[in-house]
Amino acid sequence: MIDVLNLTKQYGQHTVVDGLTFTVRSGAVTGFLGPNGAGKSTTMRMVLGLTRPDAGSVRIDGRAYHALRYPARRVGALLETAAPHRGLTAADHLLWVAQSNRIAPQRVAEVIELVGLAGAARRRVGTFSLGMGQRLGLAVALLGDPPVLVLDEPVNGLDAEGIRWLRELLRAMAAEGRTVLVSSHLMNEMSMVADHLIVIHRGQLLSDSSMSNFVERHGRTYVRVRAPEPGLLGRELERKGASLTLAPDGSLEVAGMPAAEISRLAAAVGVPLDELSTRTGSLEDAFLGLVGDGERSARV
């Protein structure tokens, strides 16, 4: 597990991370979300011992990162700021990391194949595209076959095939019981890979919940209704306390009343229904709604 306890970091008078506490558990993909400037990258750097906190602590299976003897065998990390030497080949860069962490040399060929760089193993890193560089970063993270993964924007630069491959890999690694922490600004992708969400804003924790609970609590759920006489049905729904929104296509979006009750009301007033379906808001809607609430609270 990754245990973050009262983590705080300031730069001058600006507090980037403010008393942050959460736990990333094994056996699940945990998404780490927040708007730009929320403190995600700084938090990840503190998890990996690259930035010293002003207060609080981070423990990975009970130990600080700097106390790990061979860190690449315990924690696989990918940060946006990571940059291997441009003059090295991909294979040489991985071999250097392997030697420094006492990882068997044959593991280099295995991860090169795993991330899809077999044809570029002898190319210099300086000639790599953004996507190839990202695959190399993922190879470094996977090199020690670590039980913990900490990945910052891992799909950056990957094509559709690469994104799908990474999604399946992360799900498989979580299913093996590993701890996976992933930061991404791509809400659609996060909704497909994450089991749990940690959401921060202005360096503070806004939410720590399962994906389903987060969307249910903060997303917009409504019933979509299409009827030949939407005006008549709409008046009856409002009279019963429902909230209505008229969609551009003429359908009604009804909040505050379940589909079964709408169906009974429509039958009672003699209005046939062409469509009656419950819609759940997206992760993006839920995230923007929660962050908006955080902005309004900060201004009060």
Image (cartoon, helix red, strand yellow):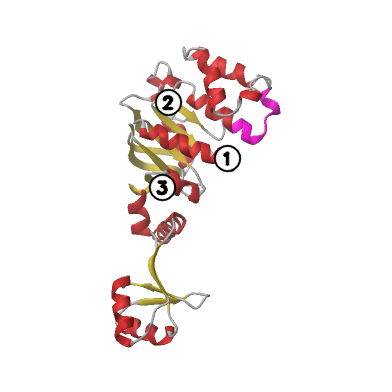
Residue drawn at the location 43% of the way across and 54% of the way down: 283
* Viewer-side label of 2, 3: 2
Q: Main secondary structure of the magenta part?
A: helix
**Rendered image quadrant of residue 54:** top left
> To which residue does mark 2 refer?
75
Ranked by sequence position, the earlier of labels 3 and 1 is 1
**Percent coordinates x, y for residue 269 in the rendering:** 32, 87
Q: Measured along the vertical axis of the image, is residue 256 above or below residue 94?
A: below
Q: Pointer 1 and pointer 2: residues touching (CB < 8 Å)?
A: no
Q: Secondary structure at mark 3?
A: strand
Q: Is residue 235 visible?
A: yes
Residue drawn at the location 62% of the way across and 21% of the way down: 90
Mark sitting on residue 161: 1
Spatial distance from mark 2 to mark 3, Cα to Cα?
Answer: 23 Å
**Percent coordinates x, y for residue 299 in the rendering:** 43, 61
Whether residue 144 appears in magenta in the rendering, the answer is no
Q: Secondary structure at mark 1?
A: helix
Badge 1 local density, few (<14 within 10 Å), some, or many (20+)?
few
Q: Is residue 53 visible?
A: no
